[in-house]
Image (cartoon, rainbow, N blue to C red):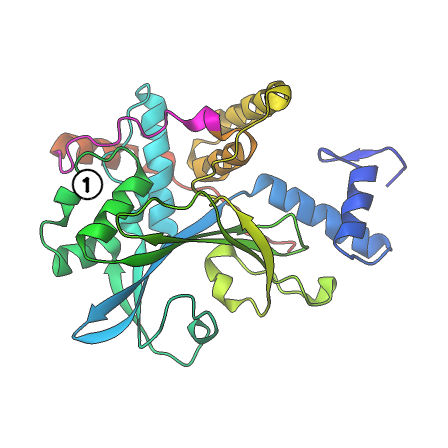
Amino acid sequence: MAAGAETADFTDAQVQAQQRQWGMPDNPEGRQATLEWMQYVGTNTKYCSGVQLKFQYGNRDGLLILQTDQEGIRQYNLNEFIRRQEEGMASAVPDWWYWHAYWYEGLELLNVYELKGGRECMELGMAHELLDRAFPGWKGALVGHQDSTSMLRAVMCHIGSLVHVEYSVGLSWRAYRGLDFVALIVSGGGKPPAEGSHWVLNSMQDPLQRPFILPELWYFCRDWLSWGQMPSMSESQKVVRPENQAMALARVKDLEARINADPGNFQNYVHHIQQIYPEYLNGYYKNVMRVMMDPAESQKRKALTDQAAMNTPPPSKL
C-alpha cells in the first residue's frame, strides 16, 4: 500500500497504527490481516445478547441461558423495519421473545469454563415457549413497559429471579479477532447499573494463530482479559460531546443511507449508530407496547418477514 493511500475507508497510517496496537507482524501478511479485520469489524457490527439466571427445572437447580439466534435477530430487524415503514410504530413482540433457552444442571452464574463442555445442556425451546409452560400469565408483566430491556427485566422480577446477568458480545477493535464481552449484574427491582464488567476475549494467542469466533459462540474463547467496565452494547448510555455531534451525525446519516439500501441488516447498522450517537435512537421503542396478541399485528409481521430477512455474509476471509 503506498504511503498516504486509502483502502476501503482506512488510510495507510490508520492501518499501520492498528497493526502496531494489535501486535501484528510487521510484514505484508500482518498488514493485510489488520486491514481485513478493520474492514470486517467496521461493516459487521452484529452483536449477540443474552441473559443468565438461576432456574429450577424438574426440581433440579441449574443455570438458564436465554440467548439470541437467527430468529431473534430476524425479529429485531423486523421490529425496526415496521418502525421505519409506519413512522415510529414498533412491533409488539420484543426480540428476546425468540431467544433460545438452554439449561445446565448444577451450573452457577458466569461459570464459563463448564459451558465449553463437561455439563449436559438441555434445550428448552424459545424464551416465550418456556415462559408459557412454566409461568402462565407472564405476559401481564409487560404492561406499562415501553422498551425491550425493561420488558425483559419486568419478566425476570415476575418469575422470581432475584439476580440475573445481562450480557452482550460483539466484534472488538481492541484485539485482532477479539470479542468484547460486557456483563451487567441486575438485581430484581433494583436500579440497573449504568455499566457492566468488560472483558476482551480471544486476545492472548499469537495474532495470526487465533481462530475466528462468532459473537454467539463466545464461550469457546480460551482466554478472557479484564478491560474495566463499559455500557452494554445493547443499552449504550454513552453521550456524544457537543463538539463531536456534527461529525457523529454525519456518520449516522451515512449509516442511515446504508439501512435504506439494506433493510434486512438493521441490527448491524443500528448497533453501530448506538456506539456513535446513542441519543439518536431514543425514540425507537416509544410505541412498542401495542396489544400483545393483536391478530392484525401478527399478520402484518408475517407479511413483512421476507422483506426484513437478514443479509449477513459469512466471514469467508477470516
Quadrant containing the C terminus in the rendered view: bottom right
The residue that appears at 76% across and 46% down in the rendered structure is 18
Report if residue 286 lies within the magenta region: yes
Question: Is residue 176 toward the left or the right of residue 238 in the image?
Answer: right
Between 2 and 228, the residue placed more toward the observer is: 228
Q: Which residues are magenta?
A: 279-294
The residue that appears at 81% across and 51% down in the rendered structure is 20
The residue that appears at 19% across and 41% down in the rendered structure is 142
Going by the numbered disc 1, the residue's amino acid type is Leu
Placement of 286 over or under 28, stated as above or below? above
The residue pinned by badge 1 equals 142
Between 119 and 6, the residue placed more toward the observer is: 119
Question: Is residue 294 toward the left or the right of residue 12 in the image?
Answer: left
Quadrant in the rendering for residue 275: top right
Q: Residue furthest left?
A: 137
Between 223 and 98, the residue placed more toward the observer is: 223
Question: Is residue 238 toward the left or the right of residue 204 in the image?
Answer: left
The residue that appears at 56% across and 27% down in the rendered structure is 240
Q: Residue furthest bottom?
A: 118
- Secondary structure under the numbered disc 1 in the rendered image: helix
Q: Position of residue 295 (x, y in %)?
A: 12, 34
Q: Position of residue 147 (x, y in %)?
A: 30, 35
Report if residue 22 lies within the magenta region: no
Q: Residue furthest right?
A: 3
Secondary structure predominantly adopted by residues drawn in magenta? loop
Q: Position of residue 68 (x, y in %)?
A: 37, 52
